[in-house]
Image: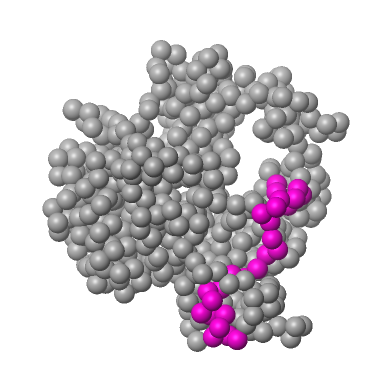
Amino acid sequence: MEETDAIFLWGSNARETHPIFFHHVLKGVRNGAKLYVVDPRRTSSAQWADTWLGLDVGSDISLANAMAREIIAAGLMHERFIQHATSGFEAYRECVEEYTLERAERETGVPAEKIRAAAHAYAKATRAVICWTLGITEHHNAVDNVLALINLALLTGHVGRYGSGLNPLRGQNNVQGGGDMGAIPDRLPGFQHVENDELRGKFERAWGCRIPPKKGWHLSQMFQAMERGELTTLYVLGENPADSEADRHHALKLLGGLEFLVVQDLFYTNTAAMADVVLPAAAGWCESEGTVTSSERRVQRVRRAVPPPPGVRDDIEVVYELARRLGHEWGEPRSEYIWDEMRSLSPMHGGMSYRRLEESGGIQWPCYDESHPGEIFLHGRLWQEPLIGPRAPFSVVEFEPPVDQLDEEYPIRLTTGRRLDSYNTGVQTDRYPSPLRREESLDLSPEDGASYGLQEGETVRVHSRRGSVVAPVRFDPGLRRGLAFLTVHFHDQVATNELTIDAVDPKSGTSEFKATAIRIEKYEGN
C-alpha cells in the first residue's frame, strides 16, 4: 500500500472506518501514489483524494464495467496475463461493450471524462490496489459488485504482485479468522466445502460424528427460517442482531417469537435483554488465548494479559462446558490443542504451530508445513510458468438499481455508515466518552435543507416504506442533493434500522443497508 502507484478506495471511508489502515494509505500518497475515492459522499477520505468519483448509490457495476470497456477500447488490458491466467474473457468483453461512458454517466452520475481518466490511470499504473468495504457489499447484489472489481484487476494484471492487488477491508476484527475457521454456512475450516464427500469425511473421522452434507443457513436465511417456524432456538455469540438487522421492527418480532434464545457476550446488549439465558464471556483481546487473522491473511497469536473477572469465562470454556453437559467430553479447553487439531485438518494452516507464530510474529496462509514461510501473495501462482492451479475466471455482471426505488412519495436516497468515534451498534463504544462524539442526526445536503425550509438542528420525521424515526437535521456539504446519511450507532436516539430494507443478496446473505428510499417532513413536536 505504501509503495503502490494508484489506490482506489471503492465504497470505503477508510479515514473514519479503518483509521489505522488509512495511515498506510496516506504514506502511499506521500510516496507519490494517486488516490481515487469512489463513494456517493464526499467523505473525509475523499478530501485526501486526487479524484473523487461521486457515484449514485448502487451504481458500482455500471462504473466498473464502463472503466473496463474503456480499458479494452484503448488497448490497455494486460493481454499476456489474460491469456495465461484467466478464463471467460470473451463473454466478459461482450458484456462490458454495452457500458459506454455516456451510459455510465447517466446511470452513475459520474462525468464520462472522469470515468475515462480513472480507467486509464488504473490500467497504466505499474502497481495498483483496489480496496473496498461495506459501501459495495451491503447491497442486494453485493457479490456481483465485488466481482466487478475483481474483473478490473484481472483485466489489467493488478493481482498477485507486490504493490498490486484486491483488498477487502474487513468490517470487524478477525472477520477473516472467522471465515478461515469455518464460520461460513457451506465451509469447514480452511474453506473446505461441506458438500464435498471426501473433505467432509476427513472431519467426520477426526471428530467421530456425522456432519450434515448440505450447506447451512446464513444469517438472513436464519431469520427467514424463524418466520417459517423452522428455527425456534438461537445461540448468539458476540452479535447484536436486535439492533444490527435491517428492517429492525421485523427482526425484533422474529427474535421475540423464538422458543429459546441464548446470548454469550462481553456486553449486555439489546439482544441479551431478550434472551432466556445470558452467558457472560471474556474479552477476546486481553482475557483469552488464541489467534487472530488480519485482512492480509496473517495469523497472529493473542495472549491473555489479565484474567476474566469473577463469573466470566472464556468462550471456549463455555462451549466445552455446554458440550460436557450435552454428553460429550472434549477434554481440556486449551486454545493450542484446538489450533493443532484444526491445522491437522486444514492444509492451508498446516505449518502454523504456536511456536512458529510466536517466533515470527505471524504467518500468512497458505502455510503447508513447518518449513513453509507462508505465501506473501495469495494469487502469485497466476504469474507462474507454467500456471499453477485453475485459471481465474472473469464474471459477467450486469447493473441493477437498488430494490427500494425512489419515487415522488420517497424521493431521497438514504445511505448508512460509521463515524470515526463509534462502532456498529454502539455496544463497544458508547459506554465511554469521546470528544469527537455528537448526537445522531440525519445528514442532508445544504441544498436539500434549503428546499425543505429547514434549519440545522431542527427535528424532522423520516419515513421509509417500513417505518419512521425522528431525528435532528445536520447539513453536510459532502452530500449531494437527494442524498441523506445516518449511522447505526445510536439506536436509543435514532433507530436507523427501522428504515432500512432487508432486500438480501442471494449469494452472500447481506441486506441492502446502503440504499433506502425515504421522505422527510417537519416534525410537529418542534
Q: Was residue 448 drawn as part of the magenta stretch in this picture?
A: yes
- How is this picture coloured? one colour
Q: Nearer the viewer, residue 506 or 291?
A: 291
Q: In terms of depth relative to the viewer, which is nearer, 438 or 163?
A: 438
The answer to which image quadrant residue 85 occupies is: top left
Q: Quadrant of the N terminus?
A: top left
Classify residue 59 by image quadrant: bottom left
Asked if residue 349 is positioned above or below residue 195 in the image, the reply reads: above
Q: Nearer the viewer, residue 143 or 69?
A: 69
The answer to whether 75 appears left or right of 242 in the picture is left
* Left or right: 53, with 275 as reference point: left
Res 471 quadrant in image: bottom right
As drawn, the residue found furthest toward the right would be: 310
**Secondary structure predominantly adopted by residues drawn in magenta:** loop
Residue 184 seen anywhere in this rendered image of the structure:
no
Magenta-drawn segment: 428-453
Residue 295 visible to the viewer: yes
- Figure check: 295 above or below 357: below
Q: Nearer the viewer, residue 423 or 394?
A: 423
Residue 16 is left or right of residue 320, and the answer is left
Q: Residue furthest front?
A: 30
From the image, which quarter does the C terminus lie in?
A: bottom right
**Horizontal and vertical percent position of residue 448:** 53, 80
Q: Is 160 a magenta residue?
A: no
Could you tell me which residue is drawn at 41 percent across and 47 percent down?
131
> Residue, x 61% and y 23% (percent of image)?
338
Residue at x 47% of width, y 54% of height:
45
Residue 92 percent location from the top left of the image:
22, 55
